Image (cartoon, rainbow, N blue to C red):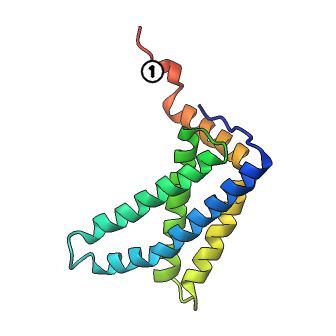
Amino acid sequence: MWSVAEPGSAHILFASALYLAAVAVFLSVQEVGLRLRRAEHRAWWAGSGRDLLNAAGVVAIGSTLHLLGLSWSAALLVGGTQTLLLFGTTVFLATQTTTRHPRAWALTAGLVLSLLVLWRRTAIAAAFGRAAVALFGTAEGLKGP
């Protein structure tokens, strides 16, 4: 369930480029999310728009992690966690700091985090798997009599 397959080197290179592109695009559209956040008190749909942006980020990042060899469960859990971290970093830098170029800093921090995930994906998937088993038990415990 929490396995990581090792595809060929050409596949890894292509999937890595797609993964980094998905992260960069997600971080780039966060400016739209920040505008929606500012409009949230005026428009009832703005919060849902931000949720859709983040859901698209989870799908894009999780899918590319799956292309990198993570099982679907590991890819979605790691991708979802990474999406939350990237979103939080973007919002923090844009609203809570006086940084001159918050988008550039968010992109830099996001790509550094993504490179860490890319290089250590097997260890990260294993750690998430151990945490999931500790929290929810094993799949065998869900089977009926």
Q: How many marks?
A: 1
Which quarter of the rendering shows the C terminus? top left
Outermost residue on the front side: it is 10
Residue that mark 1 sits on: 142
For image coordinates 23% across by 69% down, the residue present is 45
* Furthest residue in direction top, as rendered: 145
Residue extending farthest bottom: 100
Picture quadrant where residue 130 is located: top right
Task: Name which residue lies at 54% across and 25% down.
Answer: 138
Q: x and y percent of residue 42 in the render?
A: 21, 79
- Residue 64 location in percent, x, y? 59, 52
Residue under the point 49% across and 68% down: 88
| Image spot of residue 106 (x, y percent) | 58, 76
| Foreground residue among 16 and 118 | 16
* Quadrant position of the N terminus in the picture: top right
Image side of residue 33 versus residue 13, left or right? left
Report crowding for label 1: few under 14, some 14 to 19, many 20 or more residues within 10 A (C-alpha): few
Q: Nearer the viewer, residue 64 or 90?
A: 64
Residue at 49%, 81% (x, y): give it.
94
Q: Amino acid at mark 1?
A: Leu
Name the spot of residue 49 as percent of width and height, x first: 32, 67
Work out whether 135 lies above or below 138: below
Q: Looking at the image, which is closer to me, 145 or 75?
A: 75
Numbered disc 1: secondary structure: helix
